[in-house]
Amino acid sequence: MNIVLITYQGNLAGSTNSISYLAKGLALKGHKVYMVCRKNVLLNTLLENSPVHMVHLPLKGRLDWESIKALAQLCREKDIQVINAQSSYDRYIAIFAKALFRLKAKVVLTRRQEPKSIGGIQNWFYTFFSDKIVVISEELKKSFVRTGIPARHLKVVYNGIPKERFEQVSQSRIEELKKQYGIKETDVVIGCISRRKKQYQLIRALPLLDASYKVLLAGVNPGEYDALVEELGVKQEIIYAGMVPPSDVLNYYKLLNVNVLCSTTDGFGLVLVESMAMGIPVVATRFGGIINVVKDGVTGLLYEDENVEDLAQKIGTVLNDTQKRESLIKAGVSSAYQEFSMENTVTNYEAFFEELIRK
């Protein structure tokens, strides 16, 4: 197949990683894959030295005429069969390119997060002018159905992680980070590796936990929660790691005794799969696609959104109940490598695209 993946973003950690995994996976299976993105975004680095063909367009907005024409020209020259648009601007660009230039390519829109700006005319536009909308979890599908998108127009394909990603883990780098942040072998570290996603809930839960614990926040700006820490009289040491390069992030998981995700926007939660694969137990919000990733009490623990007492209790269980902790780790590793492998994701996308082309 000849496939275009297009996104104007390309710097959002979880989503960008997933797009790069998919592009590379499809290309390695022998398909011609063109990654359309802007210059100087992370995708270029992630796909360097891969069989994916990089195409740079400005992708400046929904009505970027230059990008619409260039995409249409690419599709005609390369006989593109599927255009898979990954984010807001490029959904419009892909649709307009097909409609205005009468392209034969199928247009597939991928949605990775809970719907916010969708409904009414936009629902009709996306449904009428696309051939299918991919969502990355069953719960996310339910959310879009509630907004008015017909269930038959939605296709669920779960995200995955490639095994080779874990080759980036370096024991020497882990030891270097421990020294940098003053983390001793006897320390208990609660972590949150995520861009800004309601981490204030974790801060609010800290007064209910042992004051000797340390907290490592990666993905938020240093000092982000200092005012709240002072207001609540939090005793735990807060370590701000700032923005962590994707090539280094796996080493940060190994600094943690538990990884917490306080999110109500994730349609999947790739950070949870990565954490489970690394043998780090997870506590996450009982919300959206997260409940399709974390089997509560089996591969991780879920808490009720905004219930900091529940959050603190779940963190405490992971840290203090040795038998439960070991059970969660074992089941989490198994789930990450078997249910959420990149091989499964690529195979499912491949079969889906082929079926769509046949129709």
Image (spheres, grey):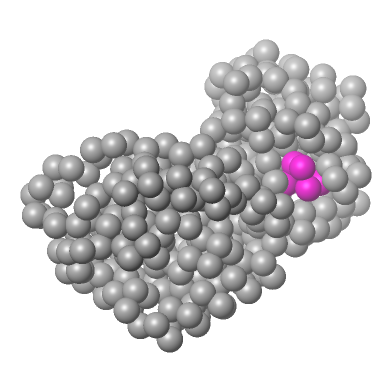
Residue 111, compared with residue 62, is above or below; it is: below
Q: Nearer the viewer, residue 179 or 292?
A: 179
| Image quadrant assignment for residue 69 | top right
Q: On the rendered structure, is 225 left or right of 281?
A: left
* Of the pair 207 and 180, the residue shown nearer to us: 180
The reply, left or right, for residue 139 in relation to residue 92 is left
Is any part of residue 141 visible from this angle? no
Magenta includes 211? Answer: no
Q: What residue is rendered at 78% in x and 23% in y?
A: 72
The total of numbered circles placed on residues is 0
Res 182 visible: yes
- Residue 31 sits in which quadrant? top right
- Look at the picture and state if 158 lies above or below 29: below
Task: Using the image, determine if residue 36 lies above or below residue 319.
Answer: above
- Which residue is drawn at the image coordinates 15% and 47% (left, top)? 228
Q: Where is residue 345 in the image (x, y as percent from the top left)?
A: 72, 57
Horizontal and vertical percent for residue 230?
A: 10, 47
Horizontal and vertical percent position of residue 76: 88, 24
What secondary structure predominates along the stretch shown in magenta?
helix
Q: Give the range drawn in magenta.
A: 22-26
- Residue drawn 29% across the image and 55% down it: 215
| In-image side of 61 versus 200 (left or right) | right
Residue 161 drawn at (x, y percent): 65, 55
| Residue drawn at 60 percent across, 21 percent down | 40
Q: Which residue lies furthest to the bottom in this view?
A: 323
